[in-house]
Amino acid sequence: MYAKYVYNAGSTVANVLSDVTALLTGESDLNNLSTSCNKGQSALVADVAAGWLLHDATAGTNARALKAPLADNPNAFKFVVVDFNTSGYVLTKVYENWNNTTHTGTNLCANSDQTPYSQRLDLTNGGTLHLCASERFLLIAGFYGGAWGSSSYNGPSGCFERTRVCPWDTVAAGWPPFIFANLGYWAYNDSSASMPRKFSRTGATLTGGSANLGSNVVPFGSLSWFMNNCNGVDQKAPDDAGGSFIPFLPILLSDNGNMPMHYGEITSLCDLWALPQGVAANLDVIQKSGVNYLCLQAQTSGKMFAVRKG
């Protein structure tokens, strides 16, 4: 699912939270959204279902908890609290578990509750939230008054499910196979993805700021190195018709500081890719194998990720 949600000047927190929740949980008609939604400028593409379920409608003041099933265990879930408590921001707080009776979560992903990694919001003057989601991930990118993404790192943020590759990382063992990441920070700092709970190379169980993961791009290695050094039209690849195409590169995860210990990848599940720098502009649409992909700026102009549009 992709939604361009344009909210009017003077929108209320309650309305925008309700609309965002509705879109992420499968609303298919913009006319059913509140008066805060500028329906003439908004757009919705739902070739793939949004895939998230409302888990706790009272997760806190101006907050709702959503959940989506895991790819290899439909009876287990990843949890995101969409939080509008902080004036001027929308947070996507990622938890290993969320109790909808006590309205509390366990093992919060580091940085997912911090405003520099979250999306900016201007209810006074109005703006836009770009929402992308499937059962495997949830991503939000904010835009208003020329300001894109998060306040410090200028990138979208959200929850992304990963594959399992380590022999100890099984459904039975119960390790949470998902992360929080701000894509702008990710393009700057490879070790900026965070897990709810991590089994380290030394056999320790780590949470919070100790449960970070590194990021790599096949076949280049470090994601930040790739984002900073692979740029320009010379990074396009030749096709079989005498032209060229923009390569989409898969994103792998690894133990921060221990690169040989891999934690799977997010691309095959989330359909999220890294692009060479300078080959696309923010919100460009690139067609690959008959599918439209939306380019999303990360950190600075030219650094882009591509995610399925709809």
Image (spheres, helix red, strand yellow):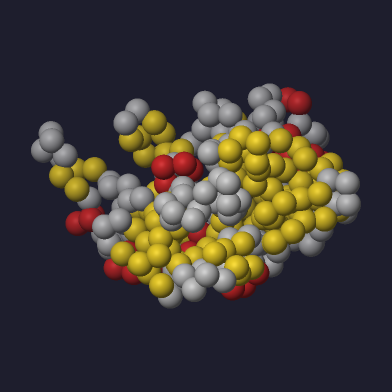
Please indicate whether residue 289 sits to the left or right of residue 11 in the image.
left
Query: How far across and how far down the image is residue 64, in percent?
Result: 79, 46
Quadrant of residue 252 within the rendered picture: bottom left
Q: Is residue 7 above or below residue 40?
A: below
* Residue occupying the point 42% across, 39% down: 293
> At 76% across and 46% down in the image, what residue appears?
65
Q: Position of residue 74 (x, y in %)?
A: 61, 35
Pick whichever, 145 or 167, lies toward us.
Answer: 167
Residue 2 screen position, x and y as percent: 56, 36
Front residue of 118 and 38: 118
* Residue that lies at the very extreme toward the left in this rendered image: 242
Q: Answer yes or no: is residue 302 visible.
A: no
Where residue 100 appears, as percent x and y from the top left, is: 83, 46
Q: In the rendered view, does 280 fall on the left or right side of 194?
A: left
Please report the residue visible at 73 percent of the width from the left and 25 percent of the height from the top: 31
Count of picture labels: 0
Q: Quadrant of residue 22?
A: top right
Along the horizontal axis of the image, is 30 left or right of 298? right
Report the side of 283 relative to 130 (left or right).
left
Return the residue nearer the eye: 252 or 90: 252
Q: Quadrant of the N terminus?
A: top right
Inspect this view and state whether residue 255 appears. yes
Rendered residue at 54%/64% (across/down): 199
